[in-house]
Amino acid sequence: MYYFGAKTKPSPLSNKFGREYFQSLRKEGTDKLSAKAFLATEQRIPGLVNGVLQDILYISGIHPKRKMANVTDDEYSMLFDTIKDTLRRMADQGGRDTEKDLFGNPGGYQTYLSKKTASTPCVKCGYELHKGNYMGGTIYYCEHCQS
Ligand SMILES: [Zn+2]
């Protein structure tokens, strides 16, 4: 048994993961998914774990529960840029500060949303960051900056 589907998906840091490819992910059937479900399920974007996609949605101003049908073309385009940019910064800075490498050193990327920043002020608006439960996991978000 071979799982061609998962194997042929390009890494979001590769050149194959371009705007056109990202656009192709948004096809019929994805409209009723929430933004989080869209990014987190079916290996649409390999390696995009919860702790990473939360920051991406935060930077993009998209609430994790927003339906993809309500994400505009401009926002979708910005989402692509944010995925590329955020993953590149995480890679360049040796990972996230919420994780440790083999030697016990935290990464240099300052995570916006994590259990460490829950209930602290949002760096964009100063309003308290929220924590919730969704899709069997914890979500963090800013009620003001994400809708
Ligand atoms: Zn905010």
Image: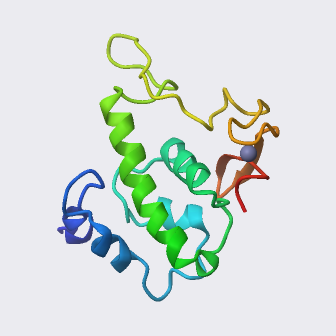
Residue 41 visible in the current orientation:
no
Q: Residue at x 26, y 55 (%)?
A: 11
Split into quadrants, the picture shows ligand 1 in the one at top right
In the displayed structure, does residue 43 sit left or right of residue 7? Answer: right
Examine the image and state in which quarter residue 82 appears: bottom left
Type of colouring:
rainbow
Q: Position of residue 118 (x, y in %)?
A: 73, 33
Q: Position of residue 51 (x, y in %)?
A: 53, 41
Rendered view: 11 above or below 106: below
Q: Residue at x 73, y 63 (%)?
A: 147
Q: Nearer the viewer, residue 142 or 106?
A: 142
Rendered view: 142 above or below 101: below
Q: Position of residue 43 (x, y in %)?
A: 37, 62
Residue 37 visible in the current orientation:
yes
Examine the image and state in which quarter residue 16 appears: bottom left
Rendered view: 85 above or below 21: above
In the displayed structure, does residue 103 sit left or right of residue 2? Answer: right
Q: Residue at x 81, y 37 (%)?
A: 128
Q: Position of residue 124 (x, y in %)?
A: 69, 41
Which residue is situated farthest in the bottom direction here? 28
Q: Residue at x 77, y 29 (%)?
A: 120
In the displayed structure, does residue 74 sit left or right of residue 14? Answer: right
Which of the image's four quarters has the N terminus? bottom left
Examine the image and state in which quarter residue 104 appears: top left
